[in-house]
Image: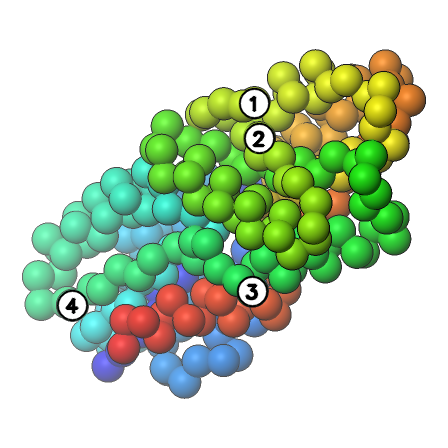
Amino acid sequence: MEAVLYICHGSRVKSACDEAVAFVERCKEVRQERILQHCFLELAEPTIFQGIQQCVEQGATKIRAIPVLLLTANHALIDIPKEINRAKQHYPQLEIQMGEPIGVHPLLIDLLVERLQQTNQEVTAWSKVVLVGRGSTNGRVKQDLSQIASNLGEKISHPVEVSFLTGCEPYFSDKIATLDSSNVDRVFILPYFLFTGILIEGIRKTVEKVVGNHDCQFIICDYLGNSPVVVEALNERIEELV
């Protein structure tokens, strides 16, 4: 019997974990498998091993493990495979296929455009649009987010800058602190995150520190969140494993 295991990141912020579980519940609605289970890589339970265990207890003989992640970094390349391999040693007869994170996906470009439109503010020739990612020491994250920024820029006919909260440069805090706002009317900040959490709060606090030093308007757009578009994109990654 087949199962789908949704592997969320996890957070110390309860509301972030709650959002992840709610998102997975929406993802389950488009699947036909009887066994659909969520788990977390870190900071919350059930863990990946516990999630696999729960699938087995429900009769699973094959599991499609899907990282509920936007970009491919060390979590998807190292941390999750490590936990899956540990479970395979415990359940040697169990077949586990691991899928890819969502990655660079046209549906999410459209969702970013929607997030900009939801601010009800015009992106003018004097505006800055800054896409903010978590960041990683893995170079693919910088490459992929830069590609997303380029694709978004083509969609809105306006340059989109990239920044990161940690792991690699340019850092969001530096970009905001050194902003020359003399010819800027609005700074649109687009968090490239699925759910709320400490990093989203970090973006807000960084902006609060500098907002009084500039005449321009800072507009923090909504994160990607529990959107049907993200459900569809993630479901495509599951279907790739069929």
Tell me if residue 14 comes above or below residue 163 in the rendering: below
Q: Determine which residue is flagged by label 2.
A: 163
Secondary structure under badge 3? helix
Identify the disc placed on residue 95.
4
Depth check, front residue: 220 or 96? 220
Residue type at mark 4 is Glu
Q: Determine which residue is flagged by label 3.
A: 107
Secondary structure under badge 4? strand
State the separation of the CA atoms marked 3 and 4. Answer: 31 Å
Q: Earlier in the sequence, mark 4 or mark 2?
A: 4
State the separation of the CA atoms marked 4 and 2. Answer: 39 Å
Residue type at mark 3 is Leu
The quadrant of the rendering that contains the C terminus is: bottom left
The nearer-to-camera label among 4 and 2 is: 2
The nearer-to-camera label among 1 and 4 is: 1
User: Residue drawn at (33%, 46%), measured in percent from left and top?
Assistant: 76
Identify the disc placed on residue 171.
1
Q: Earlier in the sequence, mark 3 or mark 4?
A: 4
Q: Relative to residue 39, is residue 87 drawn left or right?
A: left
Q: Relative to residue 210, is residue 62 drawn left or right?
A: left
Depth check, front residue: 193 or 80? 193
Residue type at mark 1 is Tyr
Please state the horizontal and vertical placement of residue 179, each as a whole percent of the image: 73, 19
Contact flag, marks 1 and 4 (Cβ < 8 Å): no
Depth check, front residue: 235 or 86? 235
User: Residue drawn at (44%, 80%), measured in percent from left and top?
Assistant: 31
Residue type at mark 2 is Ser
Q: Earlier in the sequence, mark 2 or mark 3?
A: 3
Contact flag, marks 3 and 1 (Cβ < 8 Å): no
Contact flag, marks 1 and 2 (Cβ < 8 Å): yes
